[in-house]
Amino acid sequence: MQDRTSCYFKERLKAFVFGELSEDYLSRASELGFLAGVPMPFKSEDLKGFGRAEGLDLITLSDNVIQVLGCDPDFPYLEQYRRFLRIVFEGKECEALLAAGRGEWEHERLQQAAVYFRAALEIDPEQPDALYGYALLCQALYDESEDADYVGRFKAQATECLEDVTRLREDFAPAYYHLGFAYLNLGLYTKAYFTWKLFLEKGGEGPEREEILERMETLREPMEIEAGSNHVLAGRWQQGIEALEPFLRPPYQDWWPLSYYLGAAYEGVGRGEDAAEAYRRVLRLNPSHLESLAALQRLSDAAGDAAQAEKYRKKEALIRSQLARPSEQEEE
């Protein structure tokens, strides 16, 4: 699984300091000798226990190790950390992590729950329960955010996890239910339709079954629009126009991608004025759509209207500068 979200979890590791376990301690805990020279994570309050009679709290240390495992897939000592957890949990570390994750989830500590599921996936990347739980947590986490990059990363992560679950557990109906919504949120209507069809075939029951039957019916026209858009993407301009033009009516006339693909198709067959009108319609619906601005520049240049082309060029440059500004501030 490609990890798209670790950048949002690594921040949690700022709560830890790293130090090596003493030779004296390791000599008394011979099974942990492989940790010699390995930096271990501690919170400031953990360090106070070193001087007391009770010594090192392995449960606390193991939870710290789990946090690192679940937050930073690039940490250089993950193999030693996995081995440590295997010893502490007597070979049942994955079950322990899933149980801890579910407990955090029940208390609505979603990011902490996600850390436990991520840690379980670091131990077993194809653990279906961990994949399924992490997928649903990703969906819950992006529902709480308005940051476009954050939402995009967590959407993609949830989708990939659910796809893996359906591969590993082909008859697990709930995974198809949620995967259908993941595809729907990405505008992949045909994929959503056929994924929900599998949900029904795999025995999806209860209120969800009725819900999905209704949703599948509403997808028929969006699937036709998607097919028309695919004609345009493949350079079949006239087929795209014939498929898409009938949908310039309620409730679809305000779908800016419909107008964008029509604009591209019109441009492809040399209908420059129709293309320009379609791209302008996109901008009325989505004023920051860079591809439409670039297309209008191109059409204005072709028509010899330098002033109009410059107007669109300046607007595109302004939008690009606004989009770049947040990342520049983060770097500072």
Image: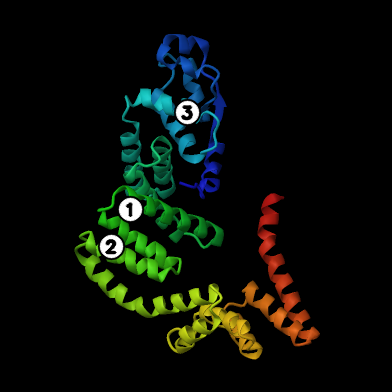
Percent x, y of residue 199: 27, 62
Which numbered disc, 3 or 2, marks the residue that appears first in the sequence? 3
| Rendered image: mark on residue 166 | 1
Three-letter residue code for mark 3? Glu
Taking depth in this image into account, of 244 and 152 the one nearest to the observer is: 244
Residue at image point 49% right, 40% down: 71
Three-letter residue code for mark 1? Thr
Taking depth in this image into account, of 40 and 217 the one nearest to the observer is: 217
Residue 181 location, quadrant: bottom left
Percent x, y of residue 260: 57, 79
Q: CA distance from mark 3 to mark 2?
A: 38 Å
CB atoms of marks 3 and 2 within 8 Å:
no
Residue 107 visible from this viewpoint: no
For label 1, the SS is helix
Three-letter residue code for mark 2? Leu
Residue that carries the numbered disc 3 in the rendered image: 79
| Rendered image: mark on residue 25 | none
Taking depth in this image into account, of 267 and 308 the one nearest to the observer is: 267
Percent x, y of residue 207: 21, 66
Which numbered disc, 1 or 2, marks the residue that appears first in the sequence? 1
Percent x, y of residue 197: 28, 66
CB atoms of marks 1 and 2 within 8 Å:
yes
